[in-house]
Amino acid sequence: MPKISERGIMMPASPIRKLVPLANEAEARGIKVIRLNIGQPDLPTPEEGLDALKHIDRKVLEYSPSEGLLSLRKRLVDYYHRFKINVDVDDIIVTTGGSEAVLFAFMSCLDPGDEIIVPEPAYANYMAFAISAGAKIVTVPSSIDEGFALPPVEDFEKLITPRTKGILICNPNNPTGYLYTRKEMERLRDIVKKYDLFLFSDEVYREYCYTGAPYISAFHLPGIEEQVVLIDSVSKRYSECGIRIGALITKHKELKKNVMKFCQARLSPPLLGQIVAEASIDATEDYMLMTYNEYVERRKFLIDGINKIPGCYTPIPMGAFYTVVSLPVDDADKFCEWCLKEFSHEGATVFMAPASGFYTTPGMGRNEVRMAYVINKQELAQALNVLAAALRAYPGRTI
């Protein structure tokens, strides 16, 4: 029997999707599964995007340029200018989702054995992309007790070695919903500048910032413009995860050349997705305000409800549409499985993502889960009711 790769063995299972078979089995038993595990918004895709898909007048669905359609990249320039992100058409490379943007950034910036420092908990697929590139994620822990604020500069500097090539952040953050302040971003800028590192900044949730403070992009930080690699996606802001359109934005000329080699090797990003994404940029202010206000209401409803359940705690997330919750259980991985395999309340159960999969430090997140408030308040109310009942019944509860 041929031996499979060590890379494949090292690849972590997704904490977001690994329990899907159990959820499917629960549904096959007639149990309603309330899905808080994945950031798949239930809000409608903009009519502008759907209309573009319905009325495609092309006679051939051809390859697009490897860097993406010029018309889309021009529209993205205008979009970024709304946020005072001053980039040019040639700085933007369209990718197959934000995931490919992260992968190509790693493949183009990092050699096997190179290291990236990432505050944890972090989006689980960063680890998978690093393994694919032969690189190593080195994590600096943040704490739920401190609201998942950026760890001190000293904690980053302790981890810097000759193999360190960059720092990666997600802002607003997935999975915590934390929004980095200007002061925190300036601290990162100073570290990146001092040690001549890349700053990989995943900013796909920029529309969803819930403080009065202005949104701070990595491209707002003077002095490191050519060290910034910005990761973006239309999936969340237009509720169109399935079209798989993202972008990698950089002003580093040699890096762009490297990225383009990988883009050419995979030929082109999805044509139909680009057509929909380009049209969706014309989504009205009313549409964007509707989605924003809906997440604000859901956030308050879910956070208030969680913190009323005995033994549960979550800080108030200031961005995105996720929160990490501490539960009174011995093992959140086992609890999430138990909810799907053995428990139901009034014909329903709840599907959550165990937070241990968003950490790499052993033992961290063992009593935490990530929840996504991407379902309506009626569903959230039922989820809270089911969760409270599950915690009362779970054999491994700790209170």
Image: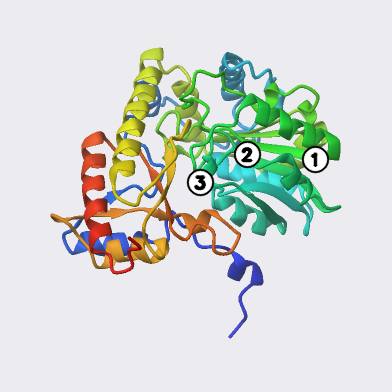
Q: Is residue 266 visible?
A: no
Identify the amino acid type marked 1. Answer: Leu
Q: Secondary structure at mark 3?
A: helix
Tell which residue pokes out farthest to the bottom in this image: 1
Above or below: residue 171 compared with residue 106: above
Mark 3 crowd level (few <14, some 14–19, many ≥20, 10 Å Cα): some
Residue 150's disc is 2
- Does 34 appear above or below 242? below
- Could you tell me which residue is drawn at 67 percent across and 45 percent down? 104
Residue nearest the observer in this picture, 61 or 380: 380
Screen quadrant of the C terminus: bottom left
In which image quadrant can residue 197 be found? top right
Q: Which residue is mark 3?
A: 144
Residue at the image position 68 percent from the left and 17 percent from the top: 86
Binning the other alpha carbons within 10 Å of mark 2 as few (below 14), some (14 to 19) or many (20 upward) gives: many
Residue under pointer 1: 197
Colour option used: rainbow
Tag 2: residue type? Leu
Q: Amino acid at mark 3?
A: Ile
Q: Please tell me which residue lies in front, 363 or 138.
A: 363
Question: How far is disc 2 from disc 3 in space, using C-alphas?
Answer: 11 Å
Q: Earlier in the sequence, mark 1 or mark 2?
A: 2
Q: Quadrant of residue 153?
A: top right
Q: Is residue 32 found left or right of 361 in the rendered image? A: left
- What residue do we see at 67% from left, 27% from top? 183
